[in-house]
Image (cartoon, coloured by chain):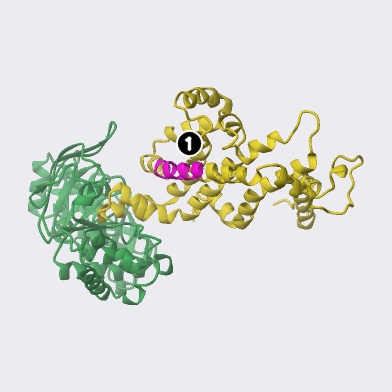
Chain colours: A yellow, B green
Amino acid sequence: MTENPISDGLLRRLNTLQLVLAGIIIMAPMAWMVLSSLKPSFEVTAYPPTLVFSPTAENYSQLIKTTPFFSYAVNSLIVTIGSAGLGLLFGIPAAFAVSWTRISWPAILTLAARMAPGTLFLLPWYVMFRQVGLIGSYTALILSHAVITLPIVIWVLLPSFDNIPRSVFEAAQVDGCSITRILWRIALPLVGSGVAVAAILAFVFSWNYFLFALVLSNGDTKTLIAAAFNFVGEGSTNWGVLMAAATLIALPPLVLATLVQRWLVAGLTLGAVKG
Amino acid sequence: MASISIRNLVKRYGNFTVIRDLNLEIADHEFVVFVGPSGCGKSTLLRIIAGLEPITSGELYIGDDRVNGVPAARRDIAMVFQDYALYPHMRVYDNMSFALELRGVPKAEIDARVKRAAALLHIEPYLDRKPKELSGGQRQRVAMGRAIVRNPKAFLFDEPLSNLDAKLRGQVRAEIKALSQQLKTTMVFVTHDQVEAMTMADRIVVLQSGNVQQYDTPEAVYERPSNQFVAGFIGSPTMNFFPVELRGEGVALSHDGTAVALNGESKARLKNAGGKGVLGIRPEHFAIAPDAAEGMPVAIKLVEPLGSDTLIHFDLAGSTAIARVDPALRPRVGDRLALRPQPGKTHLFDADNGQVLS
């Protein structure tokens, strides 16, 4: 055996450096956004940027006073919870069916749909929803966002279901279970963390999705992310207020991800290594 | 409790035939063991009985009911799986009561049946535990308990001992046998281990390539194997085989002409087969010839003392053979012996198709 030319200590330091650099690249825009939201409006676009300043909640109070921010937030919650729920409702049985039958093309089809550009769906949907009078409705937004949530649920849960030994399902069959009962009584309780991860990811992806809400919503049903786009004015954009809005919009997914980060990692790596 | 009847059963996966035209009658209360090498179709056959694999053609009866196409859930069969297949999220009690609950058995009766089965299997202290908190042997008992509480028409066991260590395997084997005598239910047990087959079965089904080679009692399968495959598969160490032929008035090993002392009946059978065949001698059926001229001279090349007896390996007629001898002989490598088959303990097979010569 040849000795490793890089010592363990150096390797650890390089590893740390790599993580710090990755952290800076990921966190810098977010830090910029949060700091800018706390700056007085004249300092937000100052050049060179000010690093020392007196923090103020002025942008936040202006955001709440001048926009129906909470209405948009409620819209976002309705659409996100609705589409995540819809994704789970159909995605759980779909993932189980794919795992049970080992026929994977339906799952691949949903993945292809997820990978296709949103505009591909948008135009036909717009026409279809307009014809049935659903443009601007929560229904249209929830249904369209299900295209985002359904593949996530299926693909997060598929390895979880695959990871359950087949014999456990067969034992349940011999015990007298129908397939439906096997799903609810045996399989689902065993993939609890997977379901939680799928639900969180579906929530986050739907919450962050911009395009469908931009076109299919109206003033009453606009989601936060679509509404924030309207804060960018053609002539004078109030960057401080926009940063405050962006900070608040980013908060729920960040809080969710932080709260369940261990679970998230465990759920996402499920099936990668047999226990 | 019920008999199981398999008639002209065929199982194919695409173009690959796993079981071909198999017929089998398992009597009510009988303990039948399917034994055979890997890929012989024994587990597939068991899964077909359970309803976990569809039948390609043929008929399957459990009791008087034709169950082709009847789902596993409605066959009233209990099965113990190789990996136990316990429900990981349920307590031992719930694992055992689950099937009864599905059938709408009243709670009080479920409780009584679970506790009775737990007492029978000595798993009462573990009823509140989850399967991951149990050892392999305890899980095995829970899996059996789950089957017992249901009081099914038949129990199916799919190599349930293969994940246990040797000591535990022997213990659980004896427990299953005792249980079968106590429960008096039809039991079908799959194993590749011929010791398990011999020790547990009322009757053994020896399978090879999806065909039944022999279906008989353990004693008959051991003493009167129907062909060379069965003879070689049952018994440990395996039976020794030597091509033999009639030479003049005697019988000789074809390879080097060494004379073998066989009785007149064996010679007659050999003569009927055209004077050639395969002689089978189990290791325990060699004897030391009192007179060196009457035996086959061998030189010991390996000695395996087992305590109760000793195995000696030697070359005979171009192949390595094994004999089981009295340890008091204290054989050593290099020792020369004259061996002869014990009278009436030899087997003769057709040199072409391996069937026993009659």
Residue tagged by mark 1?
A: A139
For the point 36% across and 59% down, the residue is B87
B259 and A123: which is toward the camera: A123
Horizontal arrangement in the rendering, residue B142 relative to residue A204 (left or right): left
Horizontal arrangement in the rendering, residue B68 relative to residue B163 (left or right): left
Residue B46: x, y in percent?
23, 50
**Neighbourhood count class around disc 1 (C-alpha, 10 Å): few under 14, some 14–19, many 20 upward:** some
Is residue A153 among what the camera can see? yes
Q: What residue type is labelled 1?
A: Thr
Q: Is residue B152 above or below residue A111?
A: below
Residue at the right extreme, as displayed: A48
Residue A253: x, y in percent?
62, 48
Where residue B164 sits, quadrant-wise, is bottom left
Residue B158: x, y in percent?
28, 55
> Callout 1: helix, strand or loop?
helix
B354 and B148: which is toward the camera: B148
Residue at the front extreme, as displayed: A65
Query: The numbered mark 1 sits on a residue in which chain?
Result: A
The range drawn in magenta is A82-95
Q: Is residue A131 magenta?
A: no
Residue A71: x, y in percent?
61, 44
Is residue B296 among what the camera can see? no
Majority secondary structure of magenta residues: helix
